[in-house]
Amino acid sequence: MNYAKAKKLVGNQPTFALKNMVVALSTLQFLNTPAENLRLKAAQIVLKGDPADKPEPFKQYALTGGTGTKCIMNGNTWAESEVV
């Protein structure tokens, strides 16, 4: 599973929610359904981060913003949160 598929599977969740998901799903793995095991692997991949998603020098990015704003705080990528 690549980063894009993992991100699509877990959605646009904040980091704390992904960490809580990993803890909850990895506690008693033998009780997990196959869908829960897939979600666990996806959350672990998203927490590691996208290796291709890095900020570029001399570009401006929106770090914070309100609800619905494309910014790093809301879980968007560096490319999505670039200020044009």
Image (tube, helix red, strand yellow):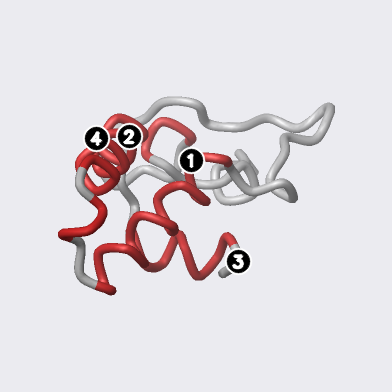
Check whether the beta carbons of the residues at disc 2 and disc 1 lie within 8 A of each other. yes
**Splitting the image into 4 quarters, where does residue 2 fall?**
bottom right
Sooner in the amino-acid sequence: mark 4 or mark 3: 3
User: Looking at this rendering, what residue extends furthest in the bottom direction?
Assistant: 34
Sooner in the amino-acid sequence: mark 4 or mark 1: 4
Horizontally, residue 4 falls left or right of residue 32, namely right
Secondary element under disc 4, as helix, strand or loop, is: helix
Secondary element under disc 3, as helix, strand or loop, is: loop
Q: Which residue is mark 4?
A: 20
Check whether the beta carbons of the residues at disc 2 and disc 4 lie within 8 A of each other. yes
Q: Which residue is mark 3?
A: 2
Q: Which residue is mark 2?
A: 19
| Mark 2 neighbour class, 10 Å CA radius: few under 14, some 14 to 19, many 20 or more | some
Which x, y percent locates residue 74? 37, 38
Q: Amino acid at mark 3?
A: Asn
Q: For marks 2 and 4, give the CA distance.
A: 4 Å
Q: Amino acid at mark 2?
A: Lys
Query: Can you tell which mark lies on residue 47?
Result: 1
